[in-house]
Image: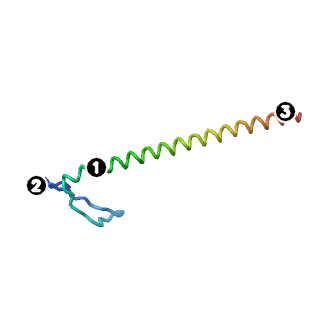
Amino acid sequence: TWHSVERTAVLSMWHGDTCTATFQLPSEDAARLIAHLADGLAELATDASVVQSRDARRESRIASAGRRLRESVRGLTRRAR
């Protein structure tokens, strides 16, 4: 909650459904907190895109290997006839 007269925000720490702590954050520190959270979220998003890209490359390699294997098997079965 914001307390404009005191120029603070009261932040609560939750563990599940239980509030385990609260503290008063001066408004001048709130901008630093928001910037820190935004930087962290941006880093997570970048990390996630790297992981997704790596996973997509892996899936593509697996699909390519599967195609090559199927083609090899088809070639073997044609020769066996």
Residue hosting label 2 = 5
Residue density around tag 1, few if under 14, some if 14–19, many if 20 or more, within 10 Å:
few
Question: On the rendered structure, is 56 left or right of 76?
Answer: left
User: Which one is earlier in the sequence, the residue at label 2 or at label 3?
Assistant: 2
Q: Which residue: 23% across, 52% down?
A: 30
Q: In this view, does 28 lie above or below 60?
A: below
Residue hosting label 3 = 78
Percent position (x, y) of residue 64?
67, 37
Query: Residue at the left extreme?
Result: 5
Q: What residue type is labelled 2?
A: Val
Between disc 2 and disc 1, the foreground one is 1
Percent position (x, y) of residue 75?
81, 34
> SS class of the residue under badge 2?
loop
Percent position (x, y) of residue 8?
17, 56
User: Which one is earlier in the sequence, the residue at label 3 or at label 1?
Assistant: 1
Q: Which residue: 13% across, 53% down?
A: 4
User: Which one is earlier in the sequence, the residue at label 2 or at label 1?
Assistant: 2
Q: Which residue: 14% across, 54% down?
A: 7
Q: In this view, does 42 lie above or below 68?
A: below
Q: Which residue: 88% across, 36% down?
A: 80
